[in-house]
Image: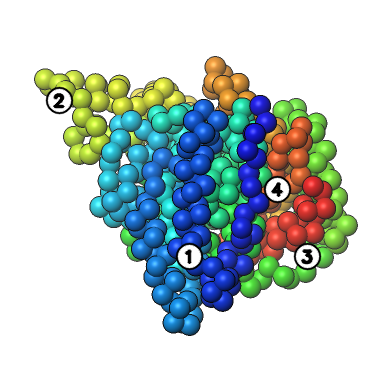
Amino acid sequence: MANPNPPPAPAWESIGALRAAIAERRTTATAVAEACFAAIARDAAAGARSVHAFLALSRERALAQAARVDALAERGDPLPPLAGAPVAVKDVLSTRGVATTCGSQILAGYLPPYDATAVERLEAAGAVILGKTNCDEFAMGSSTENSAYGPTRNPHDLERVPGGSSGGSAAAVAAGQALAALGTDTGGSIRQPAAFCGVVGLLPTYGRVSRYGLAAFASSLDHVGPLTRTPHDAALLLGAIAGYDPLDATSATEPVPDYAAGLGRPVRGLRIGLPREAFAHPGLAPAVRERVQAGVAALGAAGCDLREISLPLNDAAIAVYYVLATAEASSNLARYDGVRYGQRAAADTLAELYRKTRDRGLGAEVKRRILLGTYVLSAGYYDAYYRKAQQVRSLLARDFARAFADVDLICTPTAPTPAFRLGEKAASPLELYLADIFTVPADLAGVPAISVPCGEAEGLPIGLQLIAPAFQEERLLQLAQHFFQNCHNAMR
């Protein structure tokens, strides 16, 4: 069913435009925040026809921050880069005093005593945090159907999924309920929902953004990144949250450039690699292939040097990912035991407490992944599965390094199909896992990638994915901005 109330055109097309309007007193940060809360309330009132992007709102906190921004503007003081920008936060990132459930019943009502570093840095840059967005439980899923609090729906078609696991964040931006959002990406959970919802989703290099305050799913794969309406806004958010954090042992010390400053550089001469394995993949829908190839042709017309390349181990990426990610999940989720925080079941013994709490508090998909991970780490199977997967991961990263010796960026579809129907893949976990076939490789290799809207297929948004070498987000955003301004708009 097509959305009877399609996503409205936002009052402010970009963070820069909004910041300028606040500085010139044509609007206030408070008025913008109130407008967002009103849009969220209207959606909630629609009941079964709602998008259901948010799980919790931080109204008092948001309005206090908006008042601080308005006070700066009234005095004529310089405004911070994200001044007044209404931002949503995926519910796997800690927010002080605001419910953080990870989409799970086991954490219902949990109020963290601290903010995640990314959230703290957003507010320091002037952003207004609206609240927490729905997600697959503990970020485990590709459709946001695995939330204990009900599914999120795609703003473009309420019978379709928004993608996952950051589906609530993508839907909030697409529905005009927020100007930007934070998501997390372990195997495609920022880029795939961005493609399904027709927004921009950026996966930073592993270590570029602090993971402090992020509820861990798979620690060697988890990334925090932005979902926005434009690549320029993604550059602004990344600039605000990136950089070394002594609270995160995996945080990189690489200097953070001014990402927005390089967006206007010419793209002529950039070498773009086109993996034959991606464009010939049997699971790629013909309509998606056609639109992405049209996008690639537009890049060629802009002067980019298009080159066919091979990434031979990409087809093994899903298998490798679901061995490594589930192994790490089985370890990370052991902390949810009913003893330290979250829900606790009544029990007579400690073993019974663990069993009942986890049985009642965790959903089917999370249990499935814990069992898979425990199996591949168990005696007799560690070498056959986990060690072998680590070896293939190293080989896959080597394939990317070899490719980047000959090209500047790599281009693929973001997802093999447009958004699928709610419940369509619920009975087949493997089919659902394959929705991430083009996004998982970048996570495994630890390199940055971005999904940019690339027109429509079957009447639904699709995305074009660009991948860059490690810590080359500037180059990635440069081409993404060019494509968004000069190619995507022409393909609508």
Q: Give the mark toward the camera: 3 or 4.
A: 4
Q: CA distance from mark 1 to mark 2?
A: 50 Å
Q: Position of residue 466 (x, y in %)?
A: 69, 51
Find out whether the residues at labels 1 and 4 contact each other: C-beta distance under 8 Å: no
Q: Classify residue 204 as left or right of residue 277.
A: left
Judging by the rendered image, the residue that carries numbered circle 4 is 453
Q: Label 2 is placed on what type of residue?
A: Leu
Helix, strand or loop under label 3: loop
Chosen colour scheme? rainbow
Q: Position of residue 427 (x, y in %)?
A: 54, 17
Classify 10 Å Cα crowding around label 3: few (below 14), some (14-19), many (20 and above): some
Judging by the rendered image, the residue that carries numbered circle 2 is 350
Find out whether the residues at labels 3 and 4 contact each other: C-beta distance under 8 Å: no
Q: Give the mark toward the camera: 1 or 4.
A: 1
Classify 10 Å Cα crowding around label 2: few (below 14), some (14-19), many (20 and above): few
Q: CA distance from mark 2 to mark 3?
A: 61 Å
On residue 267, the disc is 3
Find out whether the residues at labels 1 and 3 contact each other: C-beta distance under 8 Å: no
On residue 29, the disc is 1
